[in-house]
Image (spheres, coloured by chain):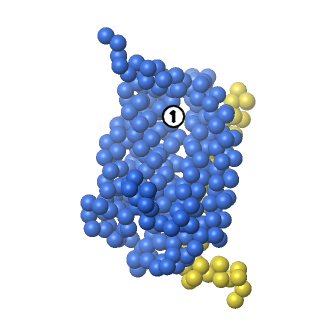
Chain colours: A yellow, B blue
Amino acid sequence: MTDFHTFAAMSGYGMYVWPAYGLAVLAYGAVFIHALIKKDRLKKQQDEK
Amino acid sequence: MDCPYEGDIIMITRFANPARFERLAKILTPVFAVLSVLLLAFGLCDALLLSPPDYQQSDAVRIMYVHVPSAWMAMMIYASCGVAALMFIVWKHTLAELFLRAALPVGAVACALCLATGMLWGKPMWGAWWVWDARLTSVLVMMFLYIAIIALADAFDRPEQGGLAAAWLTLIGLVNLPVIKYSVEWWNTLHQPGSLSSMKRMADPALAAEMLRPLLVMGLGLMCYLALVIIIRMRTQILARKIANASGVR
């Protein structure tokens, strides 16, 4: 088994560890992107007026 | 007779001015952006690559580096919303209401992640995704509070009325914070006690230094990141109010 596979397996806990990090990245990332999109949309709306 | 808190009130009023907040936000945005990128990048490398596995939990302990900072942020954001709610009720500061509206959804996401990552940690360690343990249940109550307050804030035609109702519910919900913190001491729980829950434990932490370092770095990084998101959301709220006022919409 390669080093990468050992790392990805997380001693057999990979199926719990990676979803935890994946969920965190997705949720926190979505909060940031949503905030930016909403701000840009309002700025455009303000510029149009 | 002079008010003994006059200086404090002037200070609060000074920072509650939206124009002054805009100026401060323009300085703080890049600072928090750089700090969060640096801290989270180092924290993630440390958490996943450098920190050692636990002697009992093995690599499953790495879930702690996202679970615990999310729990800290969910509680910290709720506590700061409590302060903002009090300021809005007492002084009717618009900025306090804007903070409440901007921070609550961010706190709800942190709380949901705390619960979700806790379940992912609980399954391999306890053999169950969920137990009706005092700590888990009190955090679930905080999640319901977040959802209820967000819904209540938008349930009125007049935003000020919604803000006021949300502020009162936030204040009432503050009772839950000590319950969450001390639940592991007041009741027999499956959940382990906090690693840094008191000054005594901070001086002599239950965690090894190699584990404490990524935990604190991830905590600080997440705090800077969520502060950045809240600032962006507050500026968006100010912009939305400006547009609504300009078009005569309440």
Amino acid at circle 1:
Leu
Q: Determine if residue B28 is in view.
A: yes
Residue found at x 41% / y 24%: B91
Q: On the rendered structure, is A6 left or right of B208?
A: right
User: Picture coordinates of residue B104 (x, y %)?
Assistant: 48, 45
Camera-side residue of B142 and B49: B49
**Regarding mark 1 in the picture, which secondary structure is present there?**
helix
Location of residue B132 with respect to A5 vertically, above or below: above
Camera-side residue of B193 and B161: B193
User: Picture coordinates of residue B118 (x, y %)?
Assistant: 46, 67
Camera-side residue of B69 and B110: B69
Q: Determine if residue B151 is in view.
A: no
Residue found at x 62% / y 40%: B232
User: Picture coordinates of residue B76 (x, y %)?
Assistant: 45, 47
Judging by the rendered image, the residue that carries numbered circle 1 is B98
Q: Which residue is most to the bottom?
A: A1
Q: On the rendered structure, is B71 left or right of A44?
A: left
User: Picture coordinates of residue B35 (x, y %)?
Assistant: 66, 48
Location of residue B128 with respect to B138 vertically, above or below: below
Location of the N terminus of chain B (image quadrant): top left
**Label 1 Cα crowd, 10 Å radius (few <14 / some 14-19 / many 20+):** many
Q: Which chain does the residue under circle 1 lie in?
A: B
Number of marks in the rendered image:
1
Residue found at x 65% / y 78%: A8
Residue found at x 47% / y 25%: B12
Location of residue B83 with respect to A14 vertically, above or below: above
Q: On the rendered structure, is B133 left or right of B250?
A: left
Q: Which residue is most to the front?
A: B203
Quarter occupied by residue B202: bottom left
